[in-house]
Amino acid sequence: MKELNLYEMKKVEIIVRGENLESVLDILESAGVSGYTIIHNLSGKGRHGFHEGHLMFNEEDVLDMVISVMPEEQLEVVLEGLRVFFNKHSGVVFVSDVKVSRLEKFKK
């Protein structure tokens, strides 16, 4: 059996209000990120207490998470865009080391 090759990348998870989702996607697109996954209607507990993930009034009143994997070079560009974004908007970003197979899926 052939050995599976794994490549080091960075995983970025961004949680923002639904009304700010498009701004975050614009940052990723501008940085040349090849893809992402969006999870809508998050529930959880943070500094401001428990947040219920169901739609209350519209899709902008919920929390969304964007997950992407990218090379470290792209991460710096994304983090700079998020730094500017988080100066005006609430949210959080998590960055972790991951290993992926099929490296070609993560490059444009």
Image (spheres, helix red, strand yellow):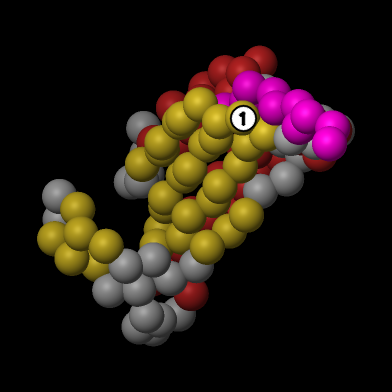
Residue 85, percent across and down? 46, 36
Label 1 residue SS:
strand
Q: Is residue 101 above or below residue 77?
A: below
The residue to which callout 1 is attached is 99
Q: Is residue 77 something one can see in this rendering? A: no
How many residues crowd mark 1 within 10 Å: few (<14), some (14–19), many (20+)?
A: few
- Whether residue 17 sits left or right of residue 74 in the image: it is left
Front one among 60 and 13: 13
Residue at 24%, 67% (x, y): give it: 51
The quadrant where residue 11 appears: top right
The quadrant where residue 108 appears: top right
- Whether residue 81 sits left or right of residue 9 in the image: it is left
Residue at 20%, 59% (x, y): give it: 45
- Whether residue 42 sits left or right of residue 70 in the image: it is left
Residue at 18%, 65% (x, y): give it: 50
Residue 34, percent across and down? 77, 39
The magenta segment = 1-10
